[in-house]
Image (spheres, rainbow, N blue to C red):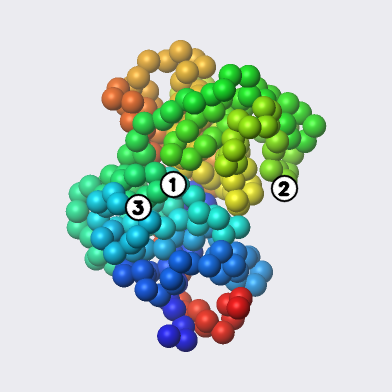
Amino acid sequence: MSTFPWLKGHGTENDFVLLPDPDGSIHGDLDPAVVRFLCDRHAGIGADGVLRVIEGPKQSYVDDGGEWFMDYRNADGSTAEMCGNGIRVFVRYLVDEGLTAAKPVRIGTRAGVKEVVLHDDGTITADLGEPKLPGPAGIVVEANGHQWPATHVDMGNPHAVAFVDDLREPGHLVDPPVWSPEDAFPSGANVEFVVRNGPYDVQMRVHERGAGETRSCGTGTCAVTVASALAARQERPVTYRVGVPGGEVSVTWRADNHLELRGPAVVHARGEFDRGWLPA
């Protein structure tokens, strides 16, 4: 095959290249160099990450029983466990193409099966499961010459949540923030900087592991909700509005300890890519 199909979508401007590959045969193990090229905003299509769409029984990454499997790759080509905005875009694609009518849709990820529901108003809710608070205590993150205490929240992928007085304080976030102790995040971390606008209203910026600063991070909004509710000693269930540079989402931390992320998702472009342009 000299060409392959692609689509482009976003959830609150966290954008992705989608690669339909139902039986997992088109892209093999998806070379990291190919992912980096596709995500390049000058030479490729441009995105924060790649979502490969594989039928659940035909993928070989995990044995989890999902109807479809979201093979998610960061813009630097590395694999990631989970993506909260990406899974909504993933389901938006499946529904638009008539590939699923299930409610909820069960999507396999490297962080386990997630149940996702499309609502009549076009928004999509993903049950992202239970958060973990693995610690250690005393984490400090640093960016732009400033330091803040941070909370480690694991949403299937690692997050460090820091409350700041002003979202401009961390600077441009071109380089990843650093943290101590150095071994707190052996596989790297997504780092969220948060200001509280009200009892259930926060605004955030994020540096995503493997992608840099992005316009939104779905699992990050969940981590921020957990850290914010704990800091305010709020009981579950609790719902937060979380503003991001690309829009806003709603996150509910349910009484059963699961987190639900609700927000928009669109697929807005498609085409074919010539394999001759890919890196050898």
**Picture quarter with the C terminus:** bottom right
- Label 1 belongs to which residue? 82
User: Front-most of 3 and 46?
Assistant: 3
Mark found first going from the N terminus, 2 or 3: 3
Q: Residue furthest bottom?
A: 2
Query: Which disc, if any, is residue 62?
Result: 3
Q: Which residue is at 40% across, 75% downward?
A: 26
What's the distance in space between the residues labelled 2 and 3, CA to CA? 33 Å
- Label 2 belongs to which residue? 174
Image position of 75 (left or right of 51): right
Which amino acid type corresponds to the residue marked 2 in the rendered image? Val
- The x and y percentages for residue 166 are 68, 29
What's the distance in space between the residues labelled 1 and 3, CA to CA? 13 Å
The 10 Å Cα crowd at callout 3, few under 14, some 14 to 19, many 20 or more, is: some
The 10 Å Cα crowd at callout 1, few under 14, some 14 to 19, many 20 or more, is: many
**Picture quarter with the N terminus:** bottom left
- The x and y percentages for residue 117 are 27, 46
Which amino acid type corresponds to the residue marked 1 in the rendered image? Met
Q: Quadrant of residue 144?
A: top right
Q: Nearer the viewer, mark 2 or mark 3?
A: 3
